[in-house]
Image (cartoon, rainbow, N blue to C red):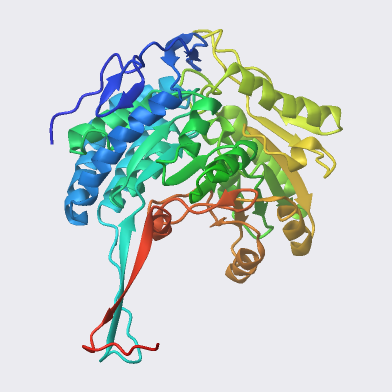
Amino acid sequence: MSKFTVSKQAARVLNFVGGKRISLATNNNTFKVYEPRSGEVLTEVEAARRSDVETALQAAHKAQTHWASIPPPERGVVLRRAAELIRENVDDISYWEVIDNGKPIEEAKADVLSCAETFDYFSAVDLNGEHIPLSDADKRLAYTRREPLGVVGAIGAWNYPIQTATWKIAPAIACGNAIIYKPSPLTPVTAVILAELLQSAGVPDGLVNVLQGGGLTGGSICQARGINKVTFTGSVSTGKLIAQGAAADYVKPVTLELGGKSSCIIFEDCDIDMAVSGAMMANFYSQGQVCSNASKVLVHRSILEPFTKSLIEHTAKMPIGDPLNPKTRIGATVSAEHLAKVNGFTASAVAEGAKLLHGGQKASVPDFPNGYYLEPAVLTGITPKMTVYGEEIFGAVLLIIPFDTDDEALGIANDTCFGLAAGIFTNNLARAHTFINKLHAGNVYVNTYNDVSPAVPFGGYGQSGYGRENGKAAVEHYSQIKSVFINASGKLDNPF
């Protein structure tokens, strides 16, 4: 393992192919990246074209052939080195995650450290096949082998830049694959830092490549015949295009982790302090820019008043400001366009009859007057006909919806085409299990929210996508099974 330090020029030259940062030859196709914290231009990035994808594919195929020949335990050593380097450089990596995305520094550190946990987990994941007993075992043997897919094409999201990259890169390379990763054009920096770190950890040149760009670059990656698997995190509309593109010329397996419209159900027997904490966790992490967020907070009518009072008091106390300040709890929204979109949801709800209890205005941060800061909004008086009731907001807009019966709460929670997550706050274990069984969601949280572990699968039902990130389930999506039969009888009858 070679020594690794994060470059102070980490935001420059952001395409990474064949083990190094590269400038794309004769490429005038560039785009500007803005720092959410200040609203100023952070860098200008070259967008990769189809020819650049082919160059990355050549490097990836060469590296993958070598990497796949290395026994999994030895590959695991490299992943553990990566985890160690992440922990050693957590402060510098977290700094760039904040500059990239705008989230508070303490959240960024938690994200980065979770990446180390993910590499540790996949360093020891079980890649063994199985021996399958047959009824005539004295004559025949059967077993399976788990083998790599080849080169993975991965497209990430902007809300958790380095974590999304890790959730795709770690299982992909653990299973013996190479990867071409395209981060969001809004947050291009930390994926390249991660690729450099993996080089220092010992992956071969070309195993992990990062190409920058928007939809055209992503489409070129998905449709390339040398790509053997596609994985995408992002919006439903883009996910549909990804799935179509991946099957257009040469069918590839696809994992889609898409949006959500989740509910957090607050029952009358809950601990109200815990429930308020859970509702805030379900809506205000990363300025509410989390796919599993529960914007619909369903509160039993008997505790509606004390719950709402406590929620507003705690929300009003959250410091909004410079995301590099450790005391900040609400940082910057990722872009000016997204800030306007989130604020538009609040405005539309009020126009349609909702009552704004708190926030919903652009926040003033004197040191950064051009930064993208927004007060968290709390709304009540929500009806099913309102836009905010059914659409994913992807921002810190919390909707309080009262209910009277368990059946009513379940109906509201399942009244969505999505199925990513749901939360329950109750002290009644039997009620919790009843709802766990009936909620149409891939992830259910009981007396907590947005909990995560690399050992536990993450993914959704319905329009929230298919396939799973993390856990043993991820191994299924980044590898393929070969079934083997062996005739041990010494003879073979000819049926002809």
Looking at the rendered image, the quarter that the N terminus falls into is top left
Instruction: Name the spot of residue 70 as percent of width and height, x first.
Output: 18, 51
Give the percent coordinates (x, y) of residue 108: 40, 31
Up/down of 75 relative to 493, above or below? above
Residue 242 occupies quadrant: top right
* Quadrant (top left/top right/bottom left/bottom right) for the C terminus: bottom left
Residue drawn 38% across and 35% down? 180
> Could you say where residue 347 lies in the image, as x and y percent from the top left?
77, 25
Q: Is residue 333 above or below residue 86?
A: above
Q: Quadrant of residue 3?
A: top left
Task: Please state which of residues 149 and 368 is positioned toward the viewer in this rendering.
Answer: 149
On the question of residue 268 being in view, the answer is: yes
Q: Quadrant of residue 413?
A: bottom right
User: In this figure, what is the number of numbered marks?
Assistant: 0
Please provide percent x and percent y for residue 340: 67, 20
Tell me if I can see residue 110 in this picture: no
* Side (left or right) of 113 relative to 329: left
Q: Residue at x 37, y 27 (%)?
A: 190
Is residue 138 positioned above or below 394 on the image?
A: below
Q: Nearer the viewer, residue 81 or 210?
A: 210
Viewer-proximal residue among 98 and 458: 458
Q: Is residue 129 left or right of residue 239?
A: left
The outermost residue toward the left is 2
Residue located 40% across and 41% down the image: 226
